[in-house]
Image: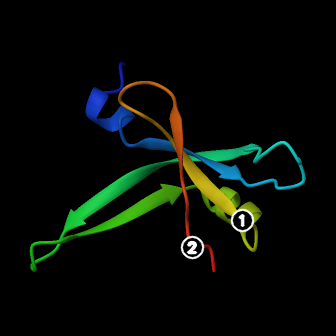
Amino acid sequence: MRVPDEVLKSVGFLAELDHADATGDEYPLRGTGFFVSIPSSKGKAFHWFVTAKQVAKELLDKEFCILVNQKGGGIIALPLDNR
């Protein structure tokens, strides 16, 4: 069974930020997840990124980001406030 394109567009990778490399940030992949958006009654929406419990536990108290594909190619790291 093929996964619909609208579902594939909502997938991202959770990556731990590793600042130990002096040449720049490294992004070791730790898991995958998907975006969920639910409209609110005030015309806005609530947005979540859903992943497996074991992935969330592994990243607890670590600095991480979500990597997503860009429309024109390449990837972008979405910074998070992990506090």
Q: Residue at x 67, y 59 (%)?
A: 64
- Please indicate whether residue 27 sits to the left or right of residue 40 in the image: right
- Please indicate whether residue 40 sits to the left or right of residue 57 in the image: left
Residue with the mark numbered 1? 63
Identify whether 73 is placed above or below 50: above
Give the mark, 1 or 2, whose residue is nearer the N terminus: 1
Q: How many marks?
A: 2
- Towards the viewer: 4 or 22: 22
- Please indicate whether residue 10 sits to the left or right of residue 38 in the image: right
Q: Residue at x 39, y 52 (%)?
A: 35
Q: Amino acid at mark 2?
A: Asp
Distance between mark 1 and mark 2 Cα atoms:
9 Å
Occupied quadrant, residue 9: top left
Q: Residue at x 16, y 74 (%)?
A: 40
Q: Secondary structure at mark 2?
A: loop
Residue with the mark numbered 2? 81
Which part of the image, by quadrant, shows the C terminus? bottom right
- Please indicate whether residue 39 sits to the left or right of residue 50 in the image: left
